[in-house]
Amino acid sequence: MGKSWSELFRENIRERMNEITDDVATGSAKDYADYMNKVGVITGLALAEREFLDIMERIERSEDG
């Protein structure tokens, strides 16, 4: 059976976050502004992932109850 849309969505967020994290870790930022942008994107993706997981958990609990 294939993955659900929610699993694919979360995997895509995580994959993008890991790509940018790897970029930062390997020093690919052109300058401080680029570095800060990458850190901001990582932070935003992490927050979005957490919110998404919280929402999915609430949906699952409401379906179980």
Image (tube, rainbow, N blue to C red):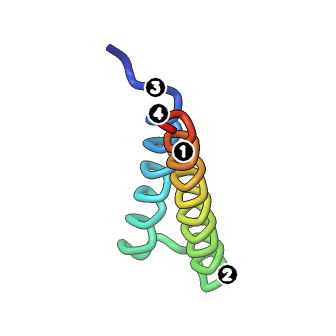
Q: Which mark is residue 33?
A: 2
- Depth-wise, is mark 1 or mark 2 nearer the camera? 1
Q: Does residue 33 sit above or below 59 in this rendering?
A: below
Between 50 and 27, which is closer to the camera in this rendering?
A: 50
Residue at horizontal 55 percent and vertical 55 percent from the top? 54
Identify which residue, 44 or 60, lies in the foreground.
60
Gap in angstroms between the C-alphas marked 1 and 2: 34 Å
Q: Earlier in the sequence, mark 3 or mark 1?
A: 3
Query: Do labels 4 and 3 touch, CB within 8 Å?
Result: yes
Q: Kindly report which numbered mark, 4 or 3, lies closer to the viewer in this rendering.
A: 3
Report x, y in % for residue 3: 39, 24
Is disc 3 placed on a helix, strand or loop? loop
Residue that carries the numbered disc 3 in the rendered image: 4
Q: Label 4 amino acid? A: Leu
Q: Measure the alpha-carbon separation of dots 4 and 3.
A: 6 Å
Measured from the top left, where is residue 8 in percent x and y? 47, 33
Q: Which residue is mark 4?
A: 8
Q: Does residue 22 appear left or right of residue 5 in this picture?
A: left
Q: Nearer the viewer, mark 1 or mark 4?
A: 1
Evaluate if marks 1 and 2 touch, with contact meaning CB atoms under 8 Å apart: no
Q: Mark 3 and 2 residues: CB-CB less than 8 Å, in contact?
A: no
Decide: marks 1, 4 in contact (CB < 8 A)? Answer: no
Check disc 1 and report its element: helix, strand or loop: helix
Marks 2 and 4, how far apart at CA: 31 Å
Query: Which quarter of the rendered picture does the N terminus lie within?
Result: top left
Where is 32 relative to 37, above or below?
below
Label number found at residue 56: 1
